[in-house]
């Protein structure tokens, strides 16, 4: 769990917050942790769904870390996928 302890993101839990309006065509949803983490702005009506997905990120990262820890030292495809997803979320990842 050393990567989780070294995480630089705002600690979870995060949750969708209040709706905000940006002009006549765009609305958004705040994502809150101990402070506002992000504002999802969307013109196609997907802001709520995107905000829920982003708000779940800290919990998903924790689960991925547990999966990666379980498969450490193996060549399990699931362990490799979990490790790669953690790297993407916690480093300056370039595909």
Image: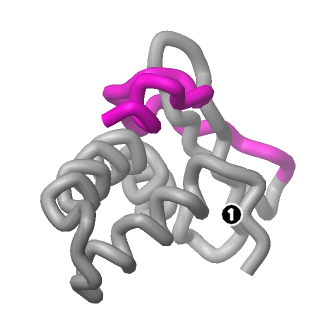
Q: Which of 14 and 28 is in front in this view?
A: 14
Residue in view at x 52 percent, y 26 percent = 6
- Report whether 17 appears left or right of 56: right
Residue in view at x 19 percent, y 66 percent = 71
Residue in view at x 81 percent, y 45 percent = 22
Residue 48 in sight: no
Q: Position of residue 45 (x, y in %)?
A: 56, 70
Query: Which span is picked out in magenta?
Result: 1-23
Above/below status of 65 relative to 83: above
Q: In which quarter of the image is the C terminus?
A: bottom right
Q: Position of residue 90 (x, y in %)?
A: 59, 47
Binning the other alpha carbons within 10 Å of mark 1 as few (below 14), some (14 to 19) or many (20 upward) gives some
- Report whether 53 appears left or right of 18: left
Above/below status of 81 relative to 73: below
Residue 44 in sight: yes
- Report whether 56 appears left or right of 63: right
In the displayed orientation, state which residue is furthest to the bottom.
77
Residue 41 image-quadrant placement:
bottom right
Above/below status of 79 relative to 87: below
User: SS of the residue at dot 1?
Assistant: strand
The residue wearing badge 1 is 42
Q: Quadrant of the N terminus?
A: top left
Q: Nearer the viewer, residue 22 or 6?
A: 6
Q: Where is residue 87 in the image (x, y as percent from the top left)?
A: 56, 59
Residue 76 image-quadrant placement:
bottom left
- Report whether 76 appears left or right of 52: left
């Amino acid at each position: 769990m050393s990567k989780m302890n070294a995480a630089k993101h705002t600690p979870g839990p995060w949750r969708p917050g209040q709706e905000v309006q940006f002009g006549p065509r765009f609305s958004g949803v705040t994502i809150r942790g101990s402070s506002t983490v992000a504002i999802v702005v969307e013109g196609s009506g997907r802001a709520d769904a995107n905000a829920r997905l982003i708000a779940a990120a800290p919990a998903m990262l924790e689960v991925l870390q547990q999966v990666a820890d379980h498969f450490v030292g193996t060549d399990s495809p699931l362990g490799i996928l979990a490790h790669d997803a953690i790297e993407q979320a916690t480093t300056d990842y370039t595909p």
